[in-house]
Amino acid sequence: MQTDLGKFILEEAPGGIIATDGHDTVIFWTRGATEIYGYSGEEAHGHRLEELIGMPGHPVRREFGADFEYLRRRKDGQAVYIGAACKPVYSAQGEIEYIIHSQNDITDAKALRDARQVESRYRGLLESMPDAIVMANSTGRIVLVNSQAERLFGFEPRELLGKPVEVLLPNRFRGGHVSHRAQYFVQPRTRTMGAGLELYGLRKDGLEFPVEISLSMIQMEEGAIVMSAIRDIGDRKKAEQKFRGLLESAPDPMVIVNARGEIVLVNSQTEQLFGYQRQELLGKPIEILIPARFAGRHPAARSSFFAKAQPRAMGAGTELYAMRRDGSEFPVEISLSPLKTEDELLVSSAIRDISGRRQIERKLIEQKLELEQASKAKDRFLASMSHELRTPLNAILGFGQLLHNEKLPLSQQQRYAFAGNIVQAGQHLLHLINETLDLAKIEVGAVTLSLEPVALDDLLHEASKMVEAMADARQVAVYLSEPRGMHVKADRIRLRQIVLNLLSNAIKYNSKGGHVWVACGAADPGRAWLAVRDDGPGLSGEQMAGLFQPFNRLGQEGGSEEGSGIGLVLSKRLAELMNATIGVTSSVGQGSTFTVEMEATAPQQLPRSEDQEGMPAPAAVRGHHSKPRLLYVEDNPANLKLVEEIVKLHLDVELLSATDGNSGVAMAREYLPDAILMDMNLPGISGREAQRRLRQDAATREIPIIALSANAMPLDVQAALEAGFFRYLTKPLNINDFLEVVGEALEQSR
């Protein structure tokens, strides 16, 4: 009974009673101890007292026989001030067997005592300060506030004294603040509270507001006191929000830096451009955004700007680069502006990525160089073309003047020779003009091709037949390889033009009695080749380098063979348009081999229309007249006069003429001529339109119409023939060709 009574008395005694063994391990813990420290008896039993209630910097001491005060820690981390006494219980051997600890919570009493002491010393000073001041002791109890703090937080005078400082914080921050406060007492120093964080205070009426807090420690006889200077920054926050809004609306990335080079503000465009999150940049040195090779010199330049801050473009006349989070660099343009605040001078940097502009500038420079080179090439081309054109013109005009001078005693043989020279020079000039125009159309992209399967064997045979006369005249033998049955994807007319050029060169620049071999075969999968090889004098390395330059005849300018120096250039350009290439191998004294490689393809299967087979063409109705009638539609008097003279001297026909397309159609319908010569460029309607109308008329449908035009481009010729023209003659006229074609047309109409 006495034991139960003693235990009851201990449990009900004021304060808390704790018993530990000689090693300070808890063996007894009363309800009063639980009320003070928050640990239940079961939680405390078996633990060392230091582990349960010890505070950093405040060890649990054994002070037997005296009352003392010390700072202790509750289970929830709160600091409490304890008035304590302890007494040892010794064993029979004289060793400490138990220690009885008497504990009383004197936190409130300590706060009031501290308040009286602090107020007597600091009240007058605190009232003179512009900021709200709150002073708290080591247990976090408020011991003094000035009137500015009471007004700021909405409390009555002295209402805050003795209350935990957490009453001035929103609930969501209170738990964390206790541990932060305890840590601050372990390592006290003057500093700004919550650097980089947004802090809020709580008024008595529950209204929150943003604050800025500075902490400092005051050592007194009774212990350490923390002084908090609190400033309401609501207006500043509003201004900052407005400023942030302006910053976010800026089209460029904006970075604001203080005098120490620390980033204090960025907008979302900066995050996007540099690849950083905002929090990764704030507080970091601005050099984090600068490549390492420039970062070392930047602090000095930054200090120089702060010394004489004024708006300007950064790095005028130099190339500036920035660096992203991933280490990639890019060119930038930066504008700097000083920004004065109530606390310090800041610098705002507007940063613009000019990678796109730099690319455009590089392209413009490249294009400028290309244009300059093209201009020089054009000048060289025009100079060469002028020379080449003037050479045959010199012969034409020179011999023409000799023939035109009636005072010269020229024999018939001389006149005949002079006329022959004029004709030969004119033909060379025509060839030169045709090739130059062809090349010009290719250069401006005005050439359209009709790519289709072309039988190589047929094309090579056709081309070799066309150069037989030239080869025989120069005693050069041309050998054609066995048929291979290969087809290539090409424009037949243009490919034949390339082959003819290669063949004519191989014959012209060969030795007398020389040989030319023409062959074709399969190359890489999907490709085919044709080659023209000769056993002529071959080419040197220097000649090979100038092989595909316009008007470069590789030293043959003064030779007996005529040429323009354009053929190979034209052939190369045409080959490229057909996805083909031209290559050459040659050595001096061993001849040359030109190889064209093209895309191979399958032969084209043309559909047959059985219902049209064997159908006779309707015959045109002809009038009865003694001589064949030939209608010439031409608006140029000189051309008309030339044809009249040719017909008068060589043909026994009746020549009719019209000077525009409409009258030509009308005369054809009225006189039903046996053949028609049609210029393509006529007043009123074109020759092509006139031909279309005559083809639609049953009376004139079958009259052969011969195109006669200065449009000598192969595609023009092909288009006219496909439209139904009987033949296509080009100006200037070759009289023999003219007489042959007109004869065929008159023969067909009989």
Image (cartoon, rainbow, N blue to C red):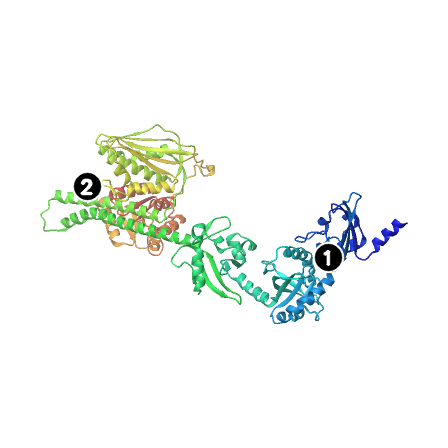
Checking the image for residue 100, the label placed there is: none
Which dot, 2 or 1, sits closer to the camera?
1
Work out whether 574 lies above or below 657.
above
Residue 512: image x %, image y %?
21, 31
Residue 169: image x %, image y %?
67, 62
Secondary structure type for disc 2: loop
Residue 179 vs residue 297: left or right?
right
Residue 395: in sight, yes or no?
yes
Residue 78: in sight, yes or no?
no
Residue contact between numbered discs 2 and 1, judged by CB atoms under 8 Å: no
Per the image, the residue denoted by label 2 is 558
Per the image, the residue denoted by label 1 is 68
Q: Residue at x 74, y 52 (%)?
A: 64
Viewer-proximal residue, 256 or 129?
129
Work out whether 151 lies above or below 274.
below
Residue 345 vs residue 129: left or right?
left
Q: Identity of the amino acid at label 1?
A: Phe
Viewer-proximal residue, 588 or 287?
287
Question: How many marks overall?
Answer: 2
Residue 465: image x %, image y %?
30, 34
Asked where in the image residue 557 lies, by quadrant, the reply is: top left
Asked where in the image residue 183 lies, by quadrant, the reply is: bottom right
Residue 279 vs residue 689: left or right?
right
Viewer-proximal residue, 486 or 237?
237
**Which one is earlier in the sequence, the residue at label 2 or at label 1?**
1
Q: Please, which residue is most extreme toward the top here?
A: 482
Quarter in which the C terminus is drawn:
top left
